[in-house]
Image (cartoon, grey):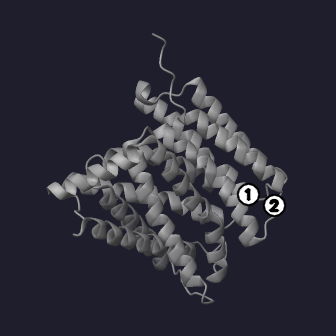
Amino acid sequence: MVSRSNSAARLDAVFGNPAAAVVLAVLCNILWGSAFPFIKMGYRLFAIDGADTPSILCFAGVRFMIGSALVWAFGSALRRRPLPMPRGRVLAECCGLGLWQTAAQYFFYYTAVATLTGAFGGILNSTQSFMGVILAHFLYGQADRLNARKALGCALGFGGVLVATLGNHGSGSAQGIFCMLAASAIFAAAGPWNKAVTQKADSFSVCCLNLGVGGLALALAGFAMGGRLTPQSGAGVPVLLYLAFISGAGYVLWALLMKNNPVSRISVFGLLIPVVNTLLSALLNGEPLFEWQYLAALVLVCGGIFLVNRPRRAAAA
């Protein structure tokens, strides 16, 4: 028990360190930024049509279930014993979080991916960053309030996202736009809930249940509706495994960052997602790329992140 507590305390210390938190938040959002183009690639490799909702749910559900298994394996190896699973009310909260953050969010997200380009989907998905910062202001008040510096940082970051997609907005259905905005809202609302649950249970266990329960719900719904998951080439399985790794690693990093840092400080790093998204969409899926837009976008996004994370100056004595 003591060794497990010490291990958790050391992990919390790393993720609570401001410099480490910045690096890990950037890594987490780069991983998530690569998800959109790889999901589109997965649809092609598994021959999933954009209107085939049951197969889309199967693809999403299997991905998250594999991701859950990866989290369990890594967490158990780190502790040299099986992950401690919560019980009673905390277990119910973890399962509820999985149905909300994984099943509900990704039902909308995967539906949107099928109908939007990477650039347009990225700009819509970036709204989760602002929702997270604003929500934290109302939930935590003085402890995580939205001040002029954070507001300017968010404005710069969103300006970067706009610049990144100039001339490359693509097209999408009204349903796709609604689904991506709904997914972003669910993600933002799940942040404080995730933060609260990880205060009561092991972060790896929370992530394992979050992904496992949500993935199982998506997969059961998809297969019950007649969905199929049949790879059309040898590249299909590696892409699915990479997406599972993204979900496992991303959820663990995000949960630990949310647990040990102010929500608004971490949420703003979501501004990196659409930049990575559109760059990889151009590289992997042949979407047009305008280099100067992305250079300018990176400058603006980094400037926004700096403003949000810059510590307050101590008052003069």
- Asked if the residue under mark 2 is in contact with the one under mark 1, i.e. CB atoms within 8 Å, the reply is no
Disc assigned to residue 289:
2
Indicate the quadrant containing the N terminus: top left, top right, bottom left or bottom right.
Answer: bottom left
Disc assigned to residue 137:
none
Q: Relative to 212, is 307 on the left or the right?
A: right
Indicate the quadrant containing the C terminus: top left, top right, bottom left or bottom right.
Answer: top left
Q: Where is residue 263 in the image (x, y as percent from the top left)?
A: 45, 40
The three-letter amino acid code for the residue at tag 1 is Ala
Q: Relative to 175, is 92 on the left or the right?
A: left
The residue singled out by tag 1 in the image is 119
How many numbered circles are shown? 2
Q: Where is residue 11 in the image (x, y as percent from the top left)?
A: 33, 53
Q: Position of residue 71 (x, y in %)?
A: 37, 67
Q: What element carries label 1?
A: helix
Which residue is farthest front? 317
Q: How crowded is mark 1: few (under 14 residues within 10 Å), some or many (20 or more)?
A: many
Task: Decide: is 266 above or below 232.
Answer: above
Q: Nearer the viewer, residue 26 or 47?
A: 26
